[in-house]
Image (cartoon, rainbow, N blue to C red):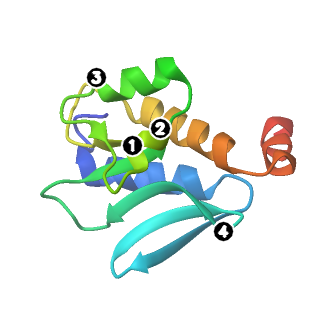
Amino acid sequence: MDPKAGPLATRRRIRDFALSLPGAVEEFPWGDDAVVKVNKKIFVFLGEEGNAASPAISAKLKDEEAHGHALAVPGAAPTGYGLGRSGWVSIPLTDPDTPAELLCDWVEESYRTIAPKRLVAELDAR
């Protein structure tokens, strides 16, 4: 993360990146908590926009290396509600040593896991 930007700016960057992916849409299924979906399926949980106390994202990381790397971020944990069993990891945005680019890479991996093949092909063609 850019230490000058702060976690809320990092969240905005991740949100903007997620919404730039083919077919991605933002929804608010639980009040102020945002998610980004593709093909009606969530690929990243963004949480509440103004949550400065504990900003975090959750992404589905099927690749063992990425999954392990994400869990090594201080404060990261398997996502609750049983999602952790399916590879979902909740990653706090408060660690200045976790670059936004890496977080965006994990969001892209989650997208590639969830999105239909035609949209992944569209992403690859960019």
Q: CA distance from mark 4 to mark 2?
A: 19 Å
Q: Secondary structure at mark 1?
A: helix
The answer to whether 74 appears left or right of 8 in the picture is left
User: Quick one: quadrant of the C terminus?
Assistant: top right
Q: Secondary structure at mark 3?
A: loop
Residue highlighted by disc 2: 87
Label 4 crowd (10 A; few <14 / some 14-19 / many >=20): few
Q: Earlier in the sequence, mark 4 or mark 2?
A: 4
Question: Identity of the amino acid at label 3?
Answer: Ala
Residue highlighted by disc 1: 84
Question: Identity of the amino acid at label 2?
Answer: Gly
Residue occupying image coordinates x 25% and y 43%:
92
User: Quick one: quadrant of the N terminus?
Assistant: top left
The answer to whether 94 appears left or right of 28 in the picture is left
Label 2 crowd (10 A; few <14 / some 14-19 / many >=20): some
Q: Earlier in the sequence, mark 1 or mark 4?
A: 4
Residue 84: x and y, percent? Answer: 39, 43
Front of the two marks 3 and 1: 1
Residue highlighted by disc 4: 40
Residue highlighted by disc 3: 72
The answer to whether 88 appears left or right of 72 in the picture is right
Are the two marked residues, 2 and 1, in contact with CB atoms closer than 8 angstroms?
Answer: yes
Q: Nearer the viewer, residue 113 or 3?
A: 113
The answer to whether 67 appears left or right of 31 in the picture is right
Q: CA distance from mark 1 to mark 4?
A: 20 Å
